[in-house]
Image (spheres, rainbow, N blue to C red):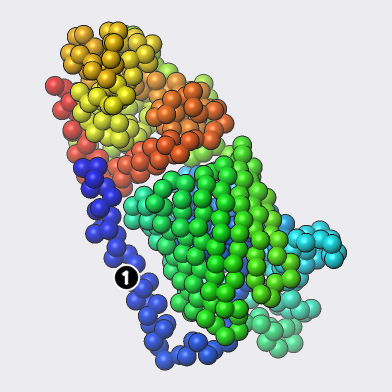
Amino acid sequence: MKNQRSILPYSKRGWLFIVPIFLSFLYLFNGKDILSDSLNLRPEVGTRGLGLSGAFISSADDATSPLWNPAGLATLQRGNLIYDLSQGALSFAYPINSIGTFGINLLDFNGGDRFLIEHASNPIGSFELGSNQALFSYARKLGPLQLGASTGYSRAPYQGSRWAQNYDIGMVTELNPYLRLGMRLRDISGVTILHENGQILQTFDQQLALGAALIPHPIIRWHNRVNIISPGFGTSLEIGNETIAARVGSAFSFNTDTPVQSWSAGFSLSQSGKQIHYTYLNHGDLEHKHLVSIGMSFGDQQPISQKPEVKTEKQQPSVEATTRVQSKEANSTIQTRPPEQSPVKYKTVQIAETYNIDVELLLAIVYTESNFNPVAVSKNGAVGLMQMMPHTAQELGLKVPAYSNKRQPIRNANTDERFNPIKNLHAGLTYFNKLFERYRGDLTLTIGAYNVGPGRVKVNGPLISRGKKYVKRVLTRAELYQNNAEQRDIDIKRLEAVLNN
């Protein structure tokens, strides 16, 4: 069943991009000689995106996402604020659980073409003074799709320029953990900026682009973009994790009015929610090639569910040695949302309520740990539904004999209580809630620490690559249960059969 997870998305979701690809061909073969037309395009802004040579269509995942693909906002789990020192762009985005993510981008905040001061010795800056833009965006995840839209106003760098409205839409989907696809249509109806006297100062034509990001390894990402209108191609290789990453890329343009090829290189640093991005952009007509932006993340990370907790009398765990561990702060509790289509009050749901955890998350952890096998034994000696190690299980009150080789446990629930599925589940959830308190309600760090151990995860993070991969697997499975009630109930019944055996 685990193997199917990386295969099924191709058959179920591949059709999602037939429509944009078809539209792309219509643009190419509608009788318009694109190669010979001189197109006017809205300038690309954003240190990180430019550092990826514009190949940010399927990879956009921060407050600057609307400048490349508004659908990228849907991945945000915390608020994000980024200021581009070089290009005078202020980007802000904040997710509101169950509603979606909202973003604002304001461009050309600088007093000159370069950061703070217009001076020959200042190497930072590249934006054309007066090319103002104000962009308002919204994105939301719907099943396998991230959808986003932006609207805003632009003006030309001329005295007396009026503002003109523009519209963008975008879409991103993850076919599997190794491949993401994206599509962006910018300035849908085109933009014409007029002078106060009615003279046309500037026009922006439509831009349609498709993107793909390949992730062969958690620290290796290969970003690509194809421009359909104003034909071109951008590709970039990025190596690193959320703490530090380096990138190098190249862009090719087949429009006669722009350079044939340019390249970029840069890096990003992130620590304790603070970020800095740097790019060297070797573009033929660009005088100031050093780009820098700074940012910060804020607010609590959005868990899978944040419905208000209903104060009801909960069933106590059946294992006397385990204790119910709850967060001291109400807003840092993993909330409960029983499955809507379950006809009866399953024991699984009751246990989830006892520990204030979404039943979808409970199922996802058990699925990822043991695939609902109560006698599973890992190569490290972890046992049962929640894959409890001997020492951890003993600390939580379970009877576990002293093994000379923990990889060869005695498969008897009376001798080793980790093989008792109910006791194993209660002990695992008690341990999970202790970690949840330790990491101050950060669900990502909690899940990661459950896998790699709290000794390898600091209270403020970050996770090592193995932990990140595990978190992604768990949350992907939990999201599947949220979006597919039938699959959720199937796996609830699988766990019920184990617990009632």
Position of the N terminus, as image quadrant, is: top left
The answer to whether 113 appears left or right of 484 in the picture is right
Locate residue 39, reporting x and y percent: 57, 83
| Above or below 196: residue 337 | above
Residue in the picture at 37% in, 13% down: 391
Position of the C terminus, as image quadrant, is: top left
Q: Nearer the viewer, residue 130 or 389?
A: 389
Type of residue at label 1?
Ile
Q: Nearer the viewer, residue 115 or 498?
A: 115
Q: Quadrant of residue 382?
A: top left
Q: Which residue is mark 1?
A: 18
Residue in the picture at 79% in, 78% down: 159
| Above or below 425: residue 2 | below
The answer to whether 467 appears left or right of 322 in the picture is right
Circle 1 residues within 10 Å: few <14, some 14–19, many ≥20: few
Count of numbered circles in the view: 1
Residue in the picture at 53% in, 74% down: 252
Locate residue 20, reporting x and y percent: 38, 72
Query: Can residue 153 be seen here?
Result: no
Q: Nearer the viewer, residue 262 or 470?
A: 262
Residue in the picture at 71% in, 61% down: 290
Query: SS for tag 1?
Result: helix
| Above or below 125: residue 26 | below
The answer to whether 450 appears left or right of 1 in the picture is right
Locate residue 291, reporting x and y percent: 69, 59
* Residue found at the very far front of the displayed protein: 404
Locate residue 147, reporting x and y percent: 43, 60
The answer to whether 324 appears left or right of 366 in the picture is right
